[in-house]
Each structure stands twice: as structure tokens, then as C-alpha cells.
Image: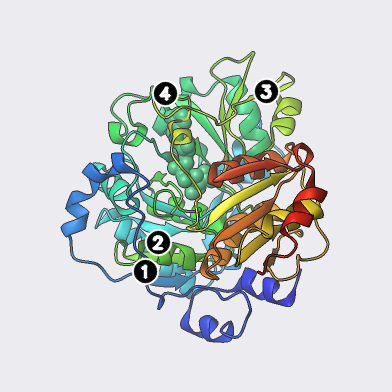
Amino acid sequence: MSATSRMQKAAPTTAKAARNTKAAARTVSTAAETVSAPRRDLDPAAMATTDALETAPPIQTKVLEVDPNWITFSAPSAVRNGAAQDPLAHLNAVPTITDPRGITALQEATRWLTVEQQVIGLPTETVYGLAGDARSSVAVSRIFAAKRRPSDNPLIVHVASLTMLEDLVGEAAITPVHRRVMAAYWPGPLTLLFPIRAGVLPPTVTAGQSTVAVRFPAHPVARALIAVSGCPLAAPSANASGRPSPTLASHVVRDLEGRIPLVLDAGQCACGLESTVLSVEDVARPVVLRPGGVTVEQLAVTLGVDVACHSGHVADAATPAAPGMKYRHYSPRARVIVVENSTPAAVKAVCGRYKRVGVLRTVSPVAVPGTVDFDARADPAQELFRALRWLDDQGVEAIVVEGMADAHVGRAFMNRVRKAASEIMDARAVTWAAVVSSTSSSTR
Ligand code: TXA
Ligand code: MG
């Protein structure tokens, strides 16, 4: 990883950090940047829900830095002594915030969530979320409005203790299969579906589904805020609907400035892709509705059965298992071309079609000359959304993405890039030598 990449990983969105990164080739977006016009063309179904927000005056968006190292969790004493009977007892650990700046930030966030029923940008280990109290219909409608999300796309509810989960869905809804995967992957990037418990959440959270999606984030800031505020937090990814998910606080500011009062900034998200969404309704045939950081292969080992993975290709008219799958996703403004079974010759040939083109490299050791290069080989999953946004900001006409093997974490990567793509090509299906020679005289 280059020095620039390392600096950006840690870079918070403060004015000072922005000055420090000014000279960097991969500029970090800052709160001071102009907010780009939202892509209203992508989500016509969302328009009805956003009218009220359209007429509301913009609000000031504040960014507060919170270092995850300011927060520690102590497990219940029975876990510490090795006397705990319940393999899920560790989920009732409580946070200690050691730095006064962390206390102030979490208090301010709590006030927005509870007193004001507002929504805020929140770091998680997957992507930044747009979080509001899941029990408040006001907060939930603000989430849909702020990101212009279609109202038929349900939200994930984030919890930070076993007790909070039990309050939300009822003890009886937590089956032995749930418990097995929770013991293995919570806290972490795995979302589980549970049957709805009547009267706990506004129906808008679940958008008419009979289940509610619940996740227990591992990120210390998200986990501590849920614990401190006492709020289960409904939180979709904090991008404007249809845009790439945010993995830096600056991405959230770019998409939602003027629409939300606060973004907590903890630097770059570690996973970079959203959580795995798993349904264990049919215990003999668990289904991954959205691949993510916890892989299908890992889940099959944990559960000892085959685990299906939804393809994600769903007709717009259908009601898919995960409603979000039917919407256009993750799209930068530039055209995205995915080259599956990628070879350097194939990528070079596709680049030859464009005057100004970006390449998101996941495999090739060297850049294609004359292109805007983003080397994501160190961690393609973590870098994908940042790369799409950054290449877009360079004003390229097209972004050529080198595909990865469609297994393990590559499955989640390929799921996202296929959804972002205007065009998917298979390097094996074309005689690239011929294409290269026919385009080699083009100027780029
Ligand atoms: O990592 C993540 O999951 C991030 C962070 C912020 O936690 N959140 C996130 O939320 O990606 P969102 O709203 O962008 O994606 C949630 C996905 C959508 O595809 C939605 O349709 C699906 O989960 N989903 C939510 N509730 C569901 C339910 N009850 N049944 C099936 N799918 C559901
Ligand atoms: Mg999303």
C-alpha cells in the first residue's frame, strides 16, 4: 500500500486533516466541498417520501472525530472468570470511554438521536450508516427522506447487547441456529433476519416484510453509541440512494451535507462492503440474501449445511427476498465496465475506447499507461467504494474494474461491482489481441 493510501486510511475529516492531505494524489473529500446534486433519476419511488425534506431549509452538518481507541469493552464478570454458561454472554459487554472528547461526541450524538429524533452519520466496521432511533417513526421517516430511499426497502436495526435484541424480537424468536451464528460472528458484519414482534417498531422500518433484519456491529463507536443512547439504531448505508456506499466520513458529508446534523468520523471502515444478510428461516437451507464480510463458505462450515447465495439479479417488478436488490446501486457518475476473468490485455483494450478512463486494479501488478490508476490490490473489498468515488472525482468517462474470483470475499466484491456496472465483459469471450490491434492507434 502506498504512503498516500496509508495516510487516507487514518485521515479524519477535520479541517486540519484536510489541509494535510491537500497535496495527496488521492484527495480526501472534506466538509468544505460542494455537495453534488443528488441523482434524482435513480430512485423514482423515493420521490414521494422526500417532498417534505425538499422544502425544509438545509441544516448545518457538523463532523466530530471519535477515535475508536478511546473506547474499550468489558465483558460481564462471568465471561471474564470463564464461568459463563451462555456462549452469547460476551454480547452483554459494556463500554468505557476513556477520552473526554469521546464522551462529548457520544453525548452530542445521543442528544440528536433521543431528544431531537434526528439522524446522524455513524461509522461501522462495514460502511458508514445513517442512524436514527429505530423505535421512532419520525427518525425512520427522516432516514428515508435524507437519503431519498424508496420506502419499500427495509432498514437494518443495529443492537449492542443480547438484552436489546431480546427486547426487539422476543426471546422465542432467537432460534438455536441464530444463536450458533451469533456466537461465531457477532459482533461483526453479519445481519440476521428475525420474525417481527408486534408493536415494537414502526412498520416503516421493515417496509411490509414479515421479518426484521438485525445486526450487532463490531465497530467500537457504533457499539458504544447504541449502548450509551439505549437506542436500537435503524441504519442503512449513509450514501444518497444509488451512490456508492460511504467508507469515509467525507463520503457521508459529500452525499448528505445540509440534510443531517452530525457525522461521527472514525476514519476508513475496515471491511468496506456492507454486511452479509442471512435468512435462517428454513434451517435446512439457510440463504445469504446479500454476500458480505462473513462469507458463504464460512457460514456453511459454522452451520454444517449447504448455504445458498442469492444471485442478486432480480427483475424490477419482483418482490425479492432482500428488497434492496432490485434497485440500481453503488453507481458513480462514470460508466462502470467490469472485466470478469480479467487479463491485462483485456483491460488495456477496454481502456482504449475512452479518452479519459480510470482503472480499478485488483490483480494486475502494473498500471495501464495513460489511465487514471487506483491500485486496490492490498484490499479490494475495503477499497472498492472509495475507489469508485475517487475515480469519479477525477472526471473519468469510464471506470474499468478488474474482476475477482467469485468466491469467499470476492463474491461480495463481484456482487457490488456487477450492480454498479453499465457493462459486464468476460475476458475469455473475446479475442483481445484483435481488439488491442484495432484500438491501439486511438489517443487517450
Ligand atoms: O453493513 C451494513 O449492513 C450497513 C451498515 C450501516 O450496517 N447497512 C446497510 O444497510 O447496508 P442498507 O439499508 O444499505 O442495506 C440493507 C439491505 C437492503 O438490501 C435491504 O433490502 C435488506 O438489507 N433488508 C433489510 N431488511 C430486510 C428484511 N426484513 N428482509 C430482507 N432483506 C432486508
Ligand atoms: Mg445501502
Q: Label 4 vs label 1: CA separation? A: 34 Å
In the rendered view, would you say 288 is above or below 372? Answer: above
Q: Nearer the viewer, residue 133 or 281?
A: 281
- Asked if the residues shown at circle 4 and circle 1 are in contact, with their CB atoms under 8 angstroms apart, the answer is no
Rendered image: mark on residue 318: 4
Q: Position of residue 195 (x, y in %)?
A: 43, 22
Q: Position of residue 58 (x, y in %)?
A: 23, 67
Q: Nearer the viewer, residue 443 or 398?
A: 443
Q: Which residue is mark 1?
A: 35
Number of the front mark, 4 or 2: 4
Q: Position of residue 136 (x, y in %)?
A: 27, 43
Q: Which residue is mark 3?
A: 307
Q: Label 3 vs label 4: CA separation? A: 23 Å
Q: Label 4 vs label 2: CA separation? A: 28 Å
- Asked if the residues shown at circle 3 and circle 4 are in contact, with their CB atoms under 8 angstroms apart, the answer is no
Could you tell me which secondary element the residue under label 2 belongs to?
helix
Could you tell me which secondary element the residue under label 3 belongs to?
loop
Could you tell me which secondary element the residue under label 4 belongs to?
loop
What amino acid does circle 3 point to?
Answer: Val
Q: Residues within 10 Å of mark 3 (few under 14, many from 20)?
A: many
What amino acid does circle 2 point to?
Answer: Asp
Residue 352 seen in this snapshot? yes
In the rendered view, would you say 287 is above or below 365? Answer: above
Rendered image: mark on residue 255: 2
Could you tell me which secondary element the residue under label 1 belongs to?
loop
**In the image: residue 258, left or right of residue 157:** left
Number of the front mark, 1 or 3: 1
